Amino acid sequence: MFRFGPLHRGRSPYQIPLKKPQVAWTYLTGGPITSSPAVLEDGSVAFASHDGRLYMVGRDGMLKWSHLTGDIIFSSPAVGHDGTMYIGSDDDHLYAIAPSQKVQWSFQVGSCPQRVGVGPDASRCDVDAGPTIGPDGVIYTGGDAIYAINPDGTLRWRFATGGHVSSAPAVLPDGMVVAGCQDDLVYAIGPDGTKRWDFRTGGDVESSPVVGEDGTVFIGSDDKKLYALGFDGQLRWAFTTSGDIRASAALAPGGLILVGSFDGQLYAIKPDGTLSFTFRTGDRIVSSVLVDVKGAVLFGSQDDRVYALEPDGRLRWSVELDGDVDSSPVLGSDGTIYVGSDDKKLYALRAPSGQAAGAP
């Protein structure tokens, strides 16, 4: 799922290639790809496009199947333990698709008067958030509210918010759900669907929350700040950048919090809220960071590049693509990097033979 697990820590068990990878293949869709891919156990890759389709391609880049929804897709696919794939669409529905490619169910989020198109009425119920699968199989997403949906497609609970929820909910071990909202608030909802706390920022919250080992919640806001909130919702610290933070943070093994900003910089922040290092790219960063098993860093930028950094922030390599990289990259077990671009392509990047890192 997006950010690899319900706590959204952005950690991969594999290693980023040590040497600059090459484009192994691309798969062209009918629209930009901001969705982040999901790599299945057999090496297949699931991803979605603004052309409204969910795609499944093999490790060789050949199409296995696709499913057309009724509008563009920002959502990233999530795959359950039984192989069921979940994807949200701007047609206001969350879809559950079985390994047989049959739609098991679709759940309509909200009752917005206009389901397709742009504007406040059309976008409030868009299913852009996650989806996130909890440890018990419950699926969490957002739209005009925060939703918990049972594995059979029935509603478990709905928590009303004051704006659109595009932030992928995080699910804590005790069942508490945390998500941001475009009403400037971060919400924490108990397993029964009642509010535990909320925290007000100075702007829309479209970043998805990350939960640390001690329960600290890290989340960005359009007010240019990354917030560290205690398990009780109390502010621990706020780190200010020079641009909106819509990317989700990642937690490095040593405790650094890594997040990109619209100011074009990647920030590495110490657990106490002070700066460790920055790395500047040529344009805004919307892509969320992946941290590999050794602490190396991988992310994209709207300067059309994918960057790999050493754990101390030094550049390892970068690869130029043919469009903005808003998609968050993922790693296959063999070290192949999969990432989408605004040029409508999914890229598979592989290191030259014998130089791939892959599994440690």
Image (cartoon, rainbow, N blue to C red):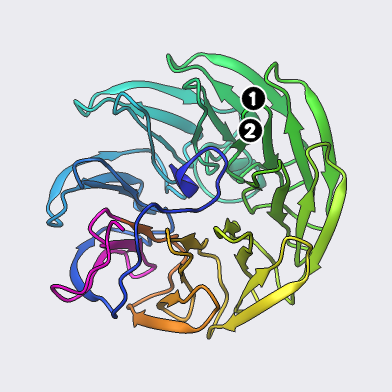
In the rendered image, residue 331, in percent from the top left (x then y), is placed at 33, 57
**Disc on res. 313:** none
Quadrant of residue 159 in the image? top right
Q: Which residue is mark 1?
A: 175
Instruction: Depth check: give the residue in front, 233 or 27.
Output: 233
Q: Is residue 53 left or right of residue 244?
A: left
- Name the kind of residue labelled 2 in the image: Leu
Tell me the kind of residue under disc 1: Gly
Quarter placement of the N terminus: top left
Rendered-image quadrant of the C terminus:
bottom left
Label 1 Cα crowd, 10 Å radius (few <14 / some 14-19 / many 20+)? some
**Disc 2 designates what residue?**
172
- Name the residue at 55% across, 77% down: 312
Q: In percent of the image, x 67 and y 20: which residue is there?
A: 191
Identify which residue is drawn at 52% across, 36% down: 115
Q: Residues within 10 Å of mark 2 (few under 14, many from 20)?
A: many
Start and end of the magenta stretch? 332-360
Q: Kindly report the secondary structure that dominates the magenta region of the rendered protein.
A: loop
Could you say where residue 282 lies in the image, as x and y percent from the top left? 53, 86
Residue 61 percent location from the top left of the image = 15, 57
- Relative height, residue 147 to residue 246 (above, below): above
Alpha-carbon distance for marks 2 and 1?
Answer: 5 Å
Q: Residue 137: x and y, percent? A: 46, 22
